[in-house]
Amino acid sequence: MVLKRKIIIILVALFVIRGAYAEEPRKSAFYKELNYIGGYSYRDRWVARKEKAQTNSVGFEYFRKFSNDYGDFLTLDLQARLAYDYFDYYKDAWSVEIHNAYLEYKPWMGHNIRVGHFDPAYGMEPVVDTHGTLFQTLMVKDLGFKKDWAVGYRGSIGWFDCQVAGGLGSGMSIDRRDGSYLVTARIGSPQGKDLQGGLSLLYGQVLVPKQMRTLPRAKYENGTVRKKRIGLDGQYLLGPALFKGEWSIGDNKGTPVMGFLMEIDYTVPFCQKLELKVQNQFFANDLENGDTIDDNLGVGLSYKLTQNLSVRVAYFQDLHTEERDNDSQVFLQIYFFGL
C-alpha cells in the first residue's frame, strides 16, 4: 500500500513538472502544486506532517485580473489542494482543501473590498506566504486555522496599510454554529520596505476544527471559544538575512494566553538557491499554568533545484511540551509550484 501511494505521487509529480515552463498569460495564470512531506519522530517514528497545516497534496492556483479602460478593477484567486492525511482513517484521509477563494474589487486606487476565503487580518500571516513552507507563523496556534470565510477591506490610509475582516470563525469549512464569528484588524507599515511592522486586534466566538479541510466538512471541538488577542509583528531585511518576529497575547474564555515567534532566514550570498532558517516558536495556552507551554526550536535548509522546484530539510526540537514528552523530528519536503 505504501509503495502504491508513492508511485501515484511520483506519477502526479511528473505530470505537474511537465507543464513547468508554460508561458504565463498576461492577465491570468494557472499554477500547479505538489507538496510531498515525510519525516521521522523520536516519539512517534514515521510521520507525514509537522502541523495540521501541512499534508501530502497536489493542487493548483488560478489567478486572474479583470480590467477595463481605467485599469484593473477585479481580482480572482482560487487555490485548492487534494490532500492525503496519514493520521486519519482511510475513508477520512482524503480531503479537498480550499485555501484562497476570493474576489477582490477595487472601487478606487488604493482601496480593495474582498469577499471569500482568505487570511484573517491578524499578525504576520497576511504579509508572508506560508502556504508551502515547513516553518509556520503563530496563526494556527492562535486560531486553529489560517484562513476564514469573510468579507474584508484592504487599503492605504495615509502612510499606513490597513486591513479589516469579519468572518464566520470556522476556518476552511463554510460553517456557522453556536453563534460563531471572527473580527480582525491590522494596521502596519507599507509592504516592500526593508523594515516592516504591524499592530493587530482579534475578537470572536471561534470554532476550533480538528482538521484543516473543506470537503468533507471538518469536525470541530465542542462549542465555540471566545478569543481576544492583540498582536505585534515585524520584519527587517539586512543584506542576505531576513529577521522576523511576532508576539500575540490575549485570552480564551478568560484564560490568559500568549505566544511569540522569532525567525532568521539567511540566503547564502555565493549560492542564492540555498536558504537557511532558524525559528523559535513559543505558545502558552494558560499563562497561569506552566504545564500548558509549547516551546520548540527549528533549523532548516531549502535548496531550489529549479525556479519552481525546491527540496527542504528541517529539524525540530521540543524544548517544552504540554505532554512533558519532548520530541525530536526531522523532515524532508519536495515542493513544486509553477506554471
Image (tube, rainbow, N blue to C red):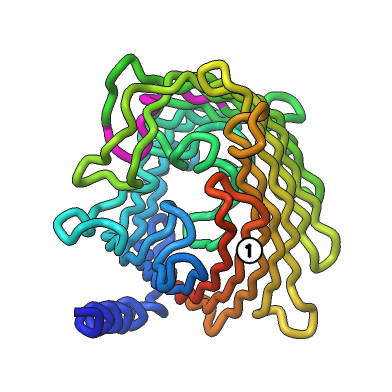
Tell me, yes or no, if residue 171 can be seen here.
yes
Image label count: 1
**Residue drawn at x 43%, y 63% as measured from the top left:** 49
Q: Is residue 338 visible?
A: no
Q: Name the residue located 31 percent from the left edge and 66 percent from the top edge.
A: 58
- Secondary element at image label 1: strand
Give me the residue at 22% from left, 40% from top: 217
Vertically, is 93 above or below 302?
above
Which x, y percent locates residue 144? 45, 38
- The secondary structure that dominates the magenta segment is loop
The stretch in magenta equals 164-174
Apparent side of residue 273 relative to residue 237 in the rendered image (left or right)? left
Q: Could you say which is closer to the camera, residue 291 or residue 120?
A: 291
Residue 193: image location, x then y, percent: 77, 48
Q: Which residue is mark 1?
A: 317
- Residue 57 counted in the magenta span: no
Compared across the picture, whether 277 is left or right of 215 comes to right
Amino acid under disc 1: Gln
In x, y percent, where is residue 77? Answer: 38, 47
Image location (x, y in percent) of residue 247: 71, 37
Camera-nearest residue between 95 and 237? 95
Q: Residue furthest right?
A: 238
From the image, which quarter does the N terminus lie in? bottom left
In this picture, residue 176 sits left or right of residue 155: left
